[in-house]
Amino acid sequence: MDQAKEGYSDLEKRDIFNNEFMVHIDALYNFAIKLTLDEDEAKDLLQDTCMKAFRFIDSFEKGTNAKAWLFRILKNSFINDYRKKSKAPGMVDYQEVETYYNSDEEKGAGQVTTDLRSETVKGMLGDEITNALNSMDVDFRTVIILCDLEGFKYEEMAKILDIPIGTVRSRLHRARNILKEKLAAYAASMGYK
Amino acid sequence: MRQAWDINSFEMGEFLRWIQKSLGMGKARCPEEERCLELLRIMLDEQATEEESKYVHKHIGNCYRCYQNYELENTIREAVKSKTHHLKVPQKLVNEITSKINL
Ligand SMILES: [Zn+2]
């Protein structure tokens, strides 16, 4: 018979926290900054995430994917505690965004032909890339961060974001279209050819 | 380790693409473009099946338009990875967190 899960001892808890969680603290901090776009809020969000992770450490299985587990907590904290604060009137939420872009794509508008050359992108500065990314809706920005910057697989992203894997793929595809359009618009405004 | 396909090893494809480029065909849309774009993104994410990778590999080997898409996608990805800032958590904050945990 399986032994009922009793939870970790205090020593084990600290051991897991210090050895399995702390190695991801920089990645978590960068994720927090890219979500909130504010250094002070990012610091609070990181701290909240760490405290929650410690409080609920019994639900973490030692040796499993700590990074994905922590990213999920951070993302949930962001949605519950931070997003509401900064949610401007008229801003749409997850589902609405999804439907909006879905219907948009059905009309064929999702696939805008952009005349952006890869040489142009190669010549862009870090700030220009960052601005394009930051100007995206947070749901789309998030999937790009998780995939391109943090190297999560679709399956891990589905768990972090609590959405089906098919939605991860379609949201990522749309996010990449949007980013490309933003870069193209920027390039055009700068007169790049 | 990276399974980025060495597109240029397809010499015939390279020649075909050169012809297409010379004829200005990079501007003309390809009927398979949308499907190809979707799959090549999955391939660049290193999560495509063998079949999907084969399709992309073969198609962009012979289609200049989609080859351009491949190059652009790859470049944007690299730019996002290498040009955005990656910060370290301020040590003060690390200390605050660990001291709260290790009370
Ligand atoms: Zn094509």
Image (cartoon, grey):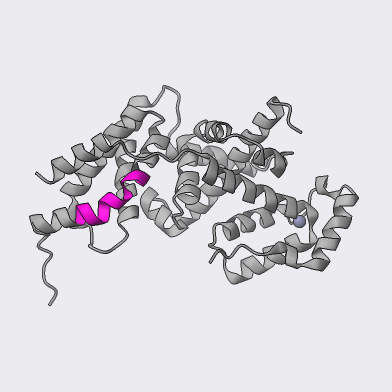
Q: Is residue A169 left or right of residue A30?
A: right
Which quadrant does ligand 1 occupy? bottom right
Q: Magenta segment, which residues? A: A16-27
For the point 53% across and 67% down, which residue is it? B1
Quadrant of residue B45 in the image? bottom right
Q: Is residue B45 left or right of residue A187?
A: left
Q: Quadrant of the C terminus of chain B?
A: top left
Does residue B99 sit above or below B3 in this rendering?
Answer: above
**For residue A25: magenta?**
yes
For the point 85% across and 51% down, which residue is it? B21
Classified by dominant secondary structure, the portion drawn in magenta counts as: helix
Q: Estimate the x, y position of residue A104 in percent, counting from the top left.
A: 61, 39
For the point 26% across and 42% down, which residue is it? A49
Q: Is residue A78 left or right of residue A101?
A: left
Q: Estimate the x, y position of residue A72 in percent, counting from the top left.
A: 33, 48
Furthest residue in direction bottom, as rendered: A1
- For the question of whether residue A61 can be seen, the reply is yes
**For residue A92: magenta?**
no
- For the question of whether residue A84 can be seen, the reply is no
